[in-house]
Image (cartoon, rainbow, N blue to C red):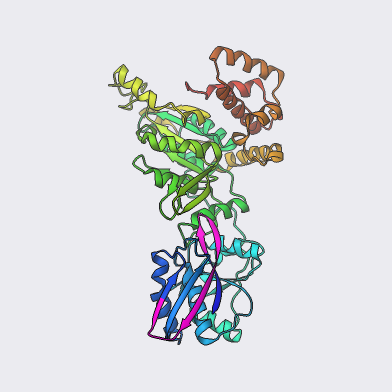
Amino acid sequence: MSSVKAVTLKGMEAKEVDVEVEIAGGLFSISIVGLPDASVRESKERVRAALKNAGISLKGRIAVNLAPADLPKEGSMLDLPIAVGLAVKSQSIPLPKPSLFVGELALDGRLRPVRGAISAAILAAEQGLPLYCPSENGSQVGLVRGVEAYKVDSLEQILGHLKSGRELASVEAVEIDDLPPSELLDWTDIRGQAMAKRALEIAAAGQHNVLMVGAPGSGKTMLARALRGILPPLSDGEVIESLTIKGVLDSTDHPNRRPPFRVVHHTASTVSVCGGGTALRPGEISLAHRGVLFLDEFTEFRRDLVEALRQPLEDGSIVISRSSGTVTYPSRVLLVLAANPCPCGWWGDSMERCSCSQSDLDRYRRKLSGPVMDRIDLQVSVSRLLPEELIGLAPSKGESSSQVRMRVTAAREAQRARWAFGGWVCNSEVPEKALREHINLSVEAEGTLLKMAEGLKLSARGLGRVLRVARTIADLSGDLQVSSASVMEALAYRGEA
């Protein structure tokens, strides 16, 4: 019997699999056992054709066992280890030392890229095993430090390496470039909307969830898309984490420091947003990890979907449980909601008349409440510009996205240093107890907050939101203490919730 090491994915984590091959006499047949899914069962045809093109004809009754037997195996990344195991057994090819093999085979023996390459590289580094992977996955595998990895173009190439020591190209360490030249909307492209832009700057600095309410055509979507351009670039660890999540779905994503930006349509299913399915795939909330999750037309979303977002937003992770197992994906996102002010969209607009009745307004506003709204730190009204303002208003000469991003990045670094003892990155993540102990309120700010809390009847949760936002405003100004002005500005974004 021959045994070759492989991997399969369980969520975003790679699990080690032993591919055991036994060949007995008799008519030709191949059976694969060990909880393989359809793509693994189909691999026997790809493997047989690839081996034939490499000059190896299979004979006899072949049994392939994927151990451990109780772990579901899925995906085409098991093609290469199964082929290597069959070649080792049928041709008596020696395996010099335990190694991990991943790769999908074409019928002519070429290797195609696979999903989960970064997860496989992380496992190889932890186990101290060499990794043989498709060349096209090299840019992903090279992100993982401490892994010995080799690029393989074809089955014939890897068999030549194992037989005669033919040299293979090593996967070189990949350095992640700084932010590429942006094709995103720039802050200067947005005319007017000073208050909304300020609210989004605060949201970006402290990773505060934000709701924008405004009539159709007021620029809510444009503002949300421009927000991505002022977010700090991802760190090396965050790039790897983001690519690992995406790697569960995509085999060809390349390193990029640009934070994710995911847009969810109001007709989306709960599984597509939160994750799940038989293969336990990540949803939009996990694909947006360390970036922006944008829900336009928020009031049109089904209530069960909105309720499902509550716990992931609170915990920063989401647990998906199915009969096939349980996986956890990270979900630390900056949630941006956009909504019209009423069913017809024109309530409070200076150019169109609202046609909604009071009962329509009351029913609509009930949708802008509930558990998810309890997680919204900033609420801002976005007004349409008048035609004469649009025509006469020159392009903004204010700060560009890169200038705002520098200030946001400095504020993030201040937060990271302050909360390092608890492992938190942003003010929005900090628990109530730690926040109150380390917020550093000035005496005047404390008096202002007490007075306003009594007058506005702020709840404990509402007070905590105001404190977090005020701390972020102070960080943007470079202030060690939270001033009375920072508290008043935070209260201005409190909304009616």
Residue 296 location, x and y as percent? 39, 37
Give coordinates of residue 323: x percent, y percent.
44, 51
Where in the figure is residue 82, as x and y percent of width and height? 48, 74
Query: In the drawing, does residue 38 fall left or right of residue 416?
Result: left
Q: Quadrant of residue 61?
A: bottom left
Q: Residue at x 60, y 81 (%)?
A: 167
Q: Which residues are magenta?
A: 8-30
Q: Position of residue 31 (x, y in %)?
A: 41, 74
Asked which quadrant contains residue 346, the reply is top left
Q: Choose between 167 and 2: the one closer to the eye.
A: 2
Residue 479 lies in magenta, yes or no? no
**On the image, which quarter does residue 317 sit in?**
top right
| Rendered-image quadrant of the N terminus | bottom right
- Decide which of 445, 241 is in the foreground and name it: 241
The residue lying at 55 percent from left, 84 percent from top is 160
Residue 22 in magenta? yes
Please give the count of numbered marks on the rendered protein: 0
Q: Residue at x 51, y 73 (%)?
A: 81
